[in-house]
Image (cartoon, helix red, strand yellow):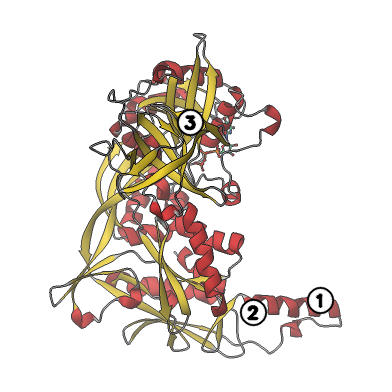
Amino acid sequence: FPPARIRNFCIIAHVDHGKTTLSDRLLQATKTIPERQMQDQLLDSMDLERERGITIKAHPVTMRYEAEDGESYQLNLIDTPGHVDFSYEVSRSLSACEGALLVIDAAQGVQAQTVANVHLATRQNLHLIPVINKIDLPTANPAAVKRQLEEVLAIPGEEAVLASAKEGIGIAEILEAVVRRIPPPQPFPDGIIRALVFDSVFDPYRGVVLYVRVRSGELARGQKILLMATQSVYEIKEVGVFNPKMAPQERLEAGATGYVIANMKSPLEVKIGDTLTSAHHPASEPLARFQEARPMVFSGIYPLNPADFEKLKTALSKLQINDPAIVFTQESSAALGSGLRCGFLGLLHMEIVQERLRREHEVEILATYPSVVYQVHLTNGKLLEVDNPLRMPDPSMIESIAEPTVRAFLLIPTERIGEILQLVLEKRGICESTESAGENRVMLRCRIPLSEILVDFNDRLKSLTRGYGSMDYEPAPYQTEDLIKLDILVNGEPVEAFSCIVARSRAESRGRAILSKLRELIPRHLFKIALQAAVGSKILAREDIGSVGKNVTAKCYGGDITRKRKLLEKQKEGKKRMKTFGRVDIPQEAFLQILKTE
Ligand code: GTP
């Protein structure tokens, strides 16, 4: 295909507005996938994605489309993830495109992430086609969404295509709009090989597969290529497109999107966002640079059974292959043994990785309270970065501590503004501005410490606005705060995994919240258990868990022996998922649930 008949585009949307469903419809309409192979949400391949209904990895796919002008076009669609934690993947995908379908739920309207995505897309000069989806819903209000488009995003309402991905309405119109409104790629005229690496996956049989967008020149088997950031040279073994499975091609031409397999052994050799060029006639400058994905949240992951450490390490290395955003180093703890300190993009990313370890790799793990990266200014003038509460130096050595903050954009119903401002305040944030965002809605711009966003901010926002509020955030500068380490003691022994850094002013309330959660989660023992929250040697709060009789079957009067046996079995089973501290068994669940405190 000549560049004039290629279109590279992606779909951007707020979570659940229907990107994946719409992608599937486009594949169907262009007969990229035969009807009988069509499986709902084909692009969401991982089980977990399917279950949680979220797209984690972006998958490109090439379609062939016969347009109304009688020409045939190559349409390259890049599906993008929708959750805040993964917005770095969105910006990567955007830079491989000339245009984007902006999907908006006809019942929900413009959401915080819709706004954030539009900002990202316009910064990259993408042409946007608004698609108002789910018009089949009885609560759909396309006219109101059009007004929001104009008022909030300054996009003319008449540009919107009305659609229902579910019912197949508006699909033909969308395909035509892609061809007519999205500009074709414009390769550099010098013919020098330049391709943007916008993603990579690891295939156990073929090695590293690079997802590329060719900006100029042509890629073919046998070429010697240079990756500019790492300055390493490889030989191309295969090039091809996704239809949506990998389909080898003779070559990838300027303007095209596809894949490259070279003799690359480890995914860690690839820097996403790098420029691929010819080793013999390299480009003088790389294509636009990317921000590297930076881990924002750290947590220690330990095997519940210390003998499983190697298994855990292997499992995490395997996950890292397809998700290089995970970083980890080895660490050890007196109480927990050997473990891994892991960095994640955000809390959802962390939960997903932990769940995949358990589910796909069958390692029972215990995760420590997540932490952000603190900048600790020491009295000796040195600066220390601390991502683990246990590594926080003695207070006598600390001059000051700064914590990362975010700029959060909250789009909420106007009548909820009081409650939301209260929430922002409670989370040590400040509201910098409020702006009307169409009928009955306002956009709040706030500065909030990242650590406060992590715990339950989004859940609280959702419940206070009955699901109508949404948020998005971007990193903002560090800010000095009076922070201290809060320890949780179980029968007088500090449990490292529960230690966290908190603002001094919030230490007591956070301590109480954690204790009451633990009280629910730790089962009764044969003896009384004292739970305490402490800062240094000062106890701020205490809760007790009373003792219980010897035998769980004691409550089963009468002689139902099978029921008794079942209970004993269950007790044994439960024990396996516990970690013993001193004489107290703490269920694995406690290490995850502790974050869900209010
Ligand atoms: P993320 O990948 O998590 O961002 O979600 P997504 O934007 O890809 O949304 P997805 O396609 O998974 O759709 C979310 C939900 O909306 C699913 O339950 C779909 O069945 C439903 N849905 C999608 N399109 C339509 C539509 O046109 N009408 C109706 N009624 N429901 C739809």
Depth check: 438 or 91 in front?
Answer: 91
Q: Is residue 511 above or below residue 445?
A: below
**Badge 3 residue CB within 8 Å of ligand 1:** no
**Badge 1 residue CB within 8 Å of ligand 1:** no
Location of residue 242 in the rendering, given as x and y in whole percent from the top left corner: 53, 34
* 261 to the left or right of 119: right
Amino acid at circle 3: Leu
Tag 1 residue: 563
Location of residue 46 in the rendering, given as x and y in whole percent from the top left corner: 58, 48
Is residue 250 something one can see in this rendering? yes
Depth check: 67 or 367 in front?
Answer: 67
Q: What element carries label 2?
A: helix
Depth-wise, is mark 2 or mark 1 nearer the camera? 2
N-term mark: 2 or 1: 1
Taking the view exactly as shown, the residue that stands out farthest to the top is 69
Tag 3 residue: 77
* 7 to the left or right of 525: left
Depth-wise, is mark 2 or mark 3 nearer the camera? 3
Callout 3 environment at 10 Å: few (<14), some (14 to 19), or many (20+)?
Answer: many
Depth check: 410 or 218 in front?
Answer: 218
Tag 2 residue: 575
N-term mark: 1 or 3: 3
Amino acid at circle 2: Lys
Callout 1 environment at 10 Å: few (<14), some (14 to 19), or many (20+)?
Answer: few
* 168 to the left or right of 143: right
Q: Is mark 3 on a helix, strand or loop?
A: strand
